[in-house]
Amino acid sequence: MLSMQNVQRIFRVQANFEEPIMNKFISFLRFVEFDENVALLYQIKGQWTASKRQNPNDSDDMDGANTFQADDIPTISIQNERNVWQRIRAMCIESLARYPASLDEDYEMLKREDLTFNERNCVLFRSGEKEILVFLLDLGEYVLKLLGMTFKSAKKASQTLPPKMDSCRDYIQNHCIRLLQTNETK
């Protein structure tokens, strides 16, 4: 769960960046972590509002489902993207610390023969949550490392991704690497 004053959203994150929810999650965090020129956010919101008004089926009355949700905020800056991944890493560390056992301990527990059906399912569910958190921790470390590189170095480093990050290739190439490229041409 993420919150910012009166704004609260719940995301069912996954260890797969091809899932649309991950784009919404990262986009919302860009909004939450934004600390730059506020005019840029108004511009993004204005573009969103204009796209909604172009739909003839929409009325002028915007209900809760049609209000700005920060679901499609593009990459803003290297610093904002760093802030996003630092926040993700902090949330993952905090969430992992709440579990009574580590992921490795869960794997060991699953090897036991004396678990009941319900106990095994609980450990499987819990270990699945931890796998996602560990994935996001690792990805955050990787992205933060890339964002600290030059465009050329990051592009070269991202050509061969670790296998578990293969679903992140689009995000890394079209967001992180493009952001570094744009930053170097300024």
Image (cartoon, rainbow, N blue to C red):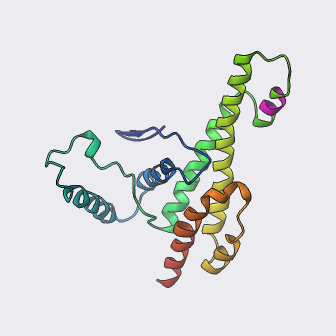
Residue 92 placement: quadrant: top right
Residue located at (18% from left, 50% from top): 57
Q: Main secondary structure of the magenta part?
A: helix
In screen coordinates, is 174 left or right of 8? right
For the residue pair 46 and 17, the one nearer the viewer reads as 17
Image coords of residue 113 (percent x, y): 86, 20
Q: How many marks?
A: 0
Q: Which residues are magenta?
A: 105-109
Percent of width and height locating residue 69:
34, 48
In the image, what residue occupies the spot 80% across and 28% down? 110
Image vertical order of residue 177 relative to residue 118, above or below: below
Image quadrant in which you'd find residue 165: bottom right
Q: At x 19% / y 56%, what residue is drawn? A: 53
The one nearer the camera, 68 or 4, is 68
Residue farthest along the bottom direction in this orientation: 185
Q: Residue furthest front?
A: 57
Residue 163 location, x and y as percent? 73, 58
Report which quarter residue 94 is drawn in: top right
Name, please, the residue furthest toward the left.
Answer: 60
Camera-side residue: 29 or 21? 21
Percent of width and height locating residue 63: 22, 41
Q: Is residue 31 magenta?
A: no
Q: Using the image, determine if residue 170 lies above or below residue 62.
A: below
Residue beneath the point at 67% across and 60% down: 142
